[in-house]
Image (spheres, grey):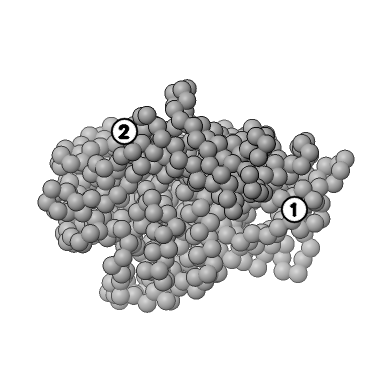
Amino acid sequence: MALVTRWTESVDRGCPWPEYPRPQLVRPRWVNLNGPWETAITEPGGDPVFDRTVLVPFPVGSALSGVEEPLRPDQRLAMRRRFEAPERAPGERLRLHFGAVDWACDVAVNGSVVGRHRGGFDPFHLDITDALVAGSAQELVVTITDPTDTGDQPVGKQTLQPFAIQYTAVAGIWQTVWLEPVPAVCIESVHACSRLADRTVTLHVVVSGAVEGYRVDAVVSGDGEDMATASGPVVDGRATVDLVLDVLRPWSPDDPFLHDLVVTVGSADDEVVDRVESYFGAREIAVVRDAEGRARLALNGRILFHLGLLDQGWWPDGLYTAPTDEALTYDIEATKAMGFNTIRKHVKVEPARWYWHADRLGVLVWQDMPSTRFDMLAFGAEMAEGTAPPDMDWATISPGRDPGGFRVELDAILDALMPFPSIVVWVPFNEAWGQHDTDATLAHVADRDPSRLVDGPSGWVDTGTGSMRDHHLYQDPHEFPGLEGDRPVVYGEYGGLKLAVDGHMWADRGWGYETTETAEELDAAYERLTGVIASLIPEGLAGAIYTQTTDVEGEINGMLTYDRAVEKIPTARLAAIHRTIWEHDGSTAGP
């Protein structure tokens, strides 16, 4: 293992990631299936021979998984483990949950196929009750294929030929796998929407298996005290519950207060058939006008400049998967300590626990949809010819060839992440990577979730729609591109200052947008750049996302090294530099 983190040795090889994986919908009975799985990598036409071991939930391709070579598009990955089925009450069903599997998988229990799934970033579950065998251990086999960047599916930054801003391919199970007994009538999701002016929270609850006469009851509490209760009938599998609180404490980066929530489903004869614990943060994100009429971003009715980091979410030991929950938390804590209030989660989706940490720690999140494949060589060739990115042949460089598949996975990701209050902006397209049906896609996202803003798109090929006008300016951030009417102007990417740190590099050489040779030079360059950003706020700049949180493989423009061992600019120093942002305009405030 060439490069490790301080958490690598803390990984529990018997059961890594032991924490409950779904903090926004908690049931007490569950069984974690993480740990060593027997594995077979099969060539075309071959039969699986389970002669290897993968440590779930670390993806194949990563050092922590135990199988570091990437899965080829023509290979099949079969993963097998045995388990004891937990006891179930009469009428209960047993679900098998996957946080995420990259990319396509068939799931069999005791030789019977119980389901299939396509999509590398969204959680899913299967009912395996009817495939269970009485009185013996159960056998679970997951068979996986992954075209990586030879296919048309959303793939993010993965590639079979890593270089610069594209990274090592992963495949297989990369988030927690678990079993959960559920009643025949059960709660599937809880999503809260707040109206601060009248202290009202509306819960949207999806319930499966319910017939006429069922209802949803909700109890809100905070600091151990009950604050409100309300009920609503289940109609066509959904219930809407309006809660009115005497005091509704807003969620924000400087006060990330979370209300506790207990939701139950009751039958017509008042029998409670299901119960989950959840939470919500009361917040409103909107576009408003400042005193000079410029469009700004506002949180809870107050203008707030979004100063953030572009966060790739990659790890040298686990690639897609952080080694531990403590490690997952660290990047968010470091971002806050540096004086940023925003994270743009870049063309990747994290486990549910990451968003829970963002909720409880208090950071605004711009969530990207993972993009489809990107031909780096074709892009580089057009750059060498002097073609500007908006004018390039994107149908060749990054084609959006499967809009139907893209939309299915986009909707699944939106539905899975909607309960998390920290997410305030959806980013359906990054630059022109797989960009297609732009106006219709942005309108679809806004219609599906009117409680958040929709970036449109982030960088390069803008069509005039979406909530924000997003520029990517690495070379000339000081030249403000001008106001955009009703849309706030933001820099979705800027910076990218490169600094190599000996002993903490993934490769011998590194890549970045602009080179600095020493820590002192980086400090001075970043302070100058921050001054430029501060000077543009009075002109109308509403947010800026610096590239990036950490080095990732050969891309060495992080605030932290890839192993998270070195702060290239000390955290306290960064926080001091960022005071320029918060003091420059009285209508903004820091984290």
Q: Tell me which residue sits at (39%, 54%) in the image.
A: 450
Question: Which residue corresponds to the image point at 23% horizontal and 50% vertical from the top-left?
Answer: 288
Pointer 1 residue: 141
Q: Where's residue 124, x and y in %?
A: 61, 52
Q: Which residue is drawn at the image coordinates 74% and 53% (left, top)?
A: 141
Residue 569, compared with residue 417, is above or below; it is above
- Decide which of 43, 231 is in the foreground and name it: 231
The quadrant of the image that shows the N terminus is top right
**Residue 323 percent coordinates (x, y):** 54, 40
Check the image and name the residue furthest to the top. 224
Q: Secondary structure at mark 1?
A: strand
The reply to whether residue 566 is in sight is: no
| Name of the residue lying farthest toward the right | 135
Whether residue 120 sits left or right of residue 533 in the image: it is right
Callout 2 crowding tier (Cα within 10 Å): few <14, some 14–19, many ≥20:
few
Q: Amino acid at mark 2?
A: Asp
> Of residues 410 and 430, which is closer to you in this image?
410
- Residue 385 is left or right of residue 121, and the answer is left
Which residue is drawn at the image coordinates 37% and 29% (left, top)?
246
Q: Is residue 530 above or below residue 433?
A: above
**Label 1 – label 2 distance at C-alpha:** 46 Å
Picture layout, residue 5 above or below residue 552? above
Q: Which mark is residue 254?
A: 2
Q: Which of the 4 quarters of the picture holds residue 475?
A: bottom left
Q: Please state, as top left, top right, bottom left or bottom right, where the C terminus lies in the image.
A: top left
Residue 8, percent across and down?
Answer: 55, 37
Can residue 102 be seen from the camera position used here? yes
Count how many numbered circles sit on residues in the image: 2
Above-or-below relation of 163 to 589: below
State the residue in front, 499 or 535. Answer: 535
- Quadrant position of residue 382: bottom left
